[in-house]
Image (cartoon, grey):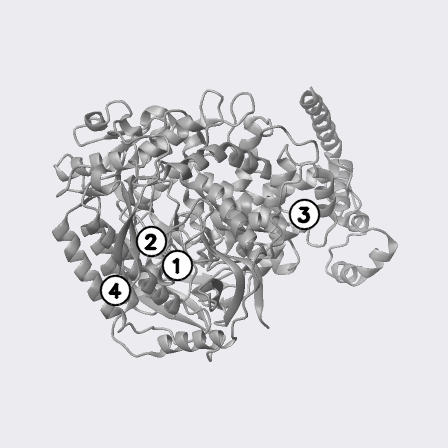
Amino acid sequence: MEVKLSVQRCHPDARPASWWQDYTVDVPEHATVLDALLAVRDDQDETLTLRCSCRSHICGSCTMRINGRSTLGCKTKLDAARARLREGEPIRIQPAGNMAVIKDLAVNLEGFFDKVKAVTPYLQPTGPEPEREYIVPNEAMLTVREAMACILCGACVSACNSLEAEPRFLGPAALAKAWRFTEDPRDGRDAERLEFLSSVPGGIWDCTHCFACVEVCPKDVRPMERILELRRRSMEAGFTDNNGSRHSQAFLDTISRSGRLDETRVAMRSVRGPSELLEWTPVGVKSFLRGKVPLRHKPIPGALRVKAIFAAAEAQGRRDSKRGAR
Amino acid sequence: MALSHDVLVVGAGLAGMRAALAAQAAGADVAIVTKVYPVRSHSNAAQGGINAALNPEDSWESHAYDTVKGSDYLGDQDAIEILAREAPGAIVELERMGVVFNRDEHGRLGSRNFGGASHARTYFVGDFTGQAILHVLYEQLVKSGIRTYNEHFCSQLLADGGGAVAGVTAFDMRSGEVLQIGARAVVLCTGGIGRVFEPSTNALICTGDGSALAYRAGAPLMDMEMVQFHPTTLKSNGALISESARGEGGYLLNSEGERFMKKTAPNAMELASRDVVSRAAQIEINEGRGVDGCVLLDVRHLGAAKIMERLPQIRELGLEFAGADMITDPVPVLPGMHYQMGGIRTDVHGATPIAGLYAAGECACVSVHGGNRLGANSLLETVVFGRRAGAAAAEFASGRKAASLPESLRDDEERRLRTLVERPGTERTAALRLEMGTTMTRQVGVFRDEPTLRDAERKLALLRERFAGVSIGDKGRLFNQALVAALELDFMLDLARTVVAGAIARTESRGAHTRVDHPRRNDAEWLRHTLCHHTPDGPVVSTAPVTITQWEPTERKY
């Protein structure tokens, strides 16, 4: 069947350095977007650059944006890619986002791997070495395996909204990797890991829980859920001296008290103290001028019932943790 | 600035990373050159597991015997003994590094059945064992701080005045910069030659670069005719459906719904060794009992829960590339090129006949697989012999001074590559590669005979001549993948000819090599390895004896 592709090209040496190029290729019915791009490179344009290897979504090389969505070229059937397009409209192919382009669809991955390296990505057992293997329940291994399914393709990083605003954010892939060790019963450095992840600039509190990484992950690793769990565990472990966990606590407090968010109070309680509050003054003033800092905060009519819900949830949580302890 | 290391490993798959870690542990300054990134290697694709006789009811002798029998007695038994003896330690070591192996009800390592094995000795992580191990070795690599030259294509081996290996030239594919990297020892861990065939289950990077570099440098390639055709690959794109589908109890059916393996392997049935199953499947297809050129793999009776826990990834592949949900439908499969048993001849320390040059993993031929590799022995080979080769290379390096190579070698290589990029021509890399691959699949496949092989030999010689007319369609320096593709094709054309030369020479049927004009195994003449030597006119074949320690060849029955 005949397929039209529109590829965002980039050759830093050329003028202009970036442009859109259309191709039409003839490929079999079952073909993927990667197959189509390889047909272009083989038969029409050998200057088209893209990474690929396994063709069966296990090596993580062919990350790209297809019609704006971050994914693997080899995991996207042409039929699916064309499903929402108008008749004759080409499939749009762009390099992965949040990483600098080297050439065409090949982006610079050094920063991506540096962030994986930053989370101490290896097992650190602390107890005595077992005689043979570590004895651990299969269920624990199955849980860790959910994150080991990550192929480090970077689709999540490409789609990450936080990274656009905060380039230091370690990002979904590296943090899912970090989660894997805190979840592994063989690792003995949970506390150190959680302390680092909750305090380092670009750590777990920089996720805006937008679900983009969960939505695009080709291996169903659900990085955002791992990040939220890291947050919960780091707070439980007492690593609360950071804006993220203060923000989280203040958020809860104001809602449990008045039934709705008190933006002013949350903002003031999220920062470390008066000196940091001073740093945020310009943002505060701007927010005030746009009506985002209400001076009076009134509880909602059903605030008492909200309190009751919180109380019930806390009681349930205590019962659950008791059961867990047993 | 001149770059130099004690040990330089080429390739960052399982064998490469294991070799690098072993060389570092032995005190060497190590670096890795890889044409991709470490986690992108084809080791990822190994789905089923890794073998070891860990269970007290099992024994290394049993594992070794199964491997010898699986190899059709072409494996070197000294090497196989090492493989089986070192397996339990290797797996426990991987577990302690962090591999999330499946467990039994007691929390100990849990195993599954696999083809050609007399015990359930395959240890596994779901159906992505290779990926799970590769990523853990990458974690260890990060921990080690070993330098990796990522996306650097190794284009030639450098020798000192005495003929010993002294380093490599490699270019950074991203920038086009050519580097000369000195080394007291080089370990080739570049994987298989799958792309010589079209289709193949192998990744696009499996172009046998290291095998060709060693061959051209004068190291012989051994048993190259021994190419494994995996019984269960998908028709649409050649993708692999793991043997674990049969290990967990899957059936192979012909168009009449018959489990046809009962005809050739009444005891082992679907879990006979791969050469046996592939031949049986190909006969069903050839004799008209196939379904659209395939046979059927049926796992429905395992139930949805087991399929989802143990075979999730291959169900996904079936859905995507065959449009069949294995929970409700059988999936059509056929034998497809999967693995190269042959490779660079090494001793049990990974040493090649060239001083300072080592090899391990699929590119090497120790030989533990002989005429047919058992499933889940390849991951094992990478870690056992990767470690041995790395340690041996470090030891060799420590006893040797660094050769002082003239810096002009780098400039020479840069000029050679530039000339290649700029040369005029009318041939295209992709067209030649496709002709080579389809010729190999059609004429050097499961069933072979002399006239067809001779014809393939002629076609490959012609392709070699036509390669001189290949024009590279990208003239730039940055990320010139057209140049890389041409260099890979250049390597593969050499390798394809060694496969055919070995297949012509071996006038018997053994393991994966089936000659319809010589249908019997012939131990009197051919209990021998073939060795391919590089000459300007093509490969020249000689032979070498097989090492037998305790298992005398007998007829193979499953």
Mark 1 / mark 2, whichever is N-terminal? 1
Tell me if residue B441 can be seen: yes
What amino acid type is highlighted by mark number 3?
Answer: Ile
User: Residue B552 at x, y = what percent?
Assistant: 30, 30
User: Residue B288 at x, y = what percent?
Assistant: 12, 37
The residue sitting at 22% across, 51% down in the picture is: B441
**Element class at badge 2:** strand
- The CA distance from mark 4 to mark 3 is 50 Å
Mark nearest the camera among 2 and 3 is 2
Mark nearest the camera among 4 and 1 is 1
Mark nearest the camera among 2 and 4 is 2
Q: Which mark is residue B507?
A: none
What amino acid type is highlighted by mark number 4?
Answer: Ala
Q: Residues within 10 Å of mark 2 (few under 14, many from 20)?
A: many
Q: Please tell me which residue lies in front, A312 or B384.
A: B384
| Residue located beneath label 2 in the image | B221
Q: Please tell me which residue lies in front, A304 or B42.
A: B42
- The CA distance from mark 1 to mark 3 is 48 Å
Q: Residues within 10 Å of mark 3 (few under 14, many from 20)?
A: many
CB atoms of marks 4 and 1 within 8 Å? no
Q: Residues within 10 Å of mark 1 (few under 14, many from 20)?
A: many
The chain that hosts pointer 3 is A
| Residue located beneath label 3 in the image | A204
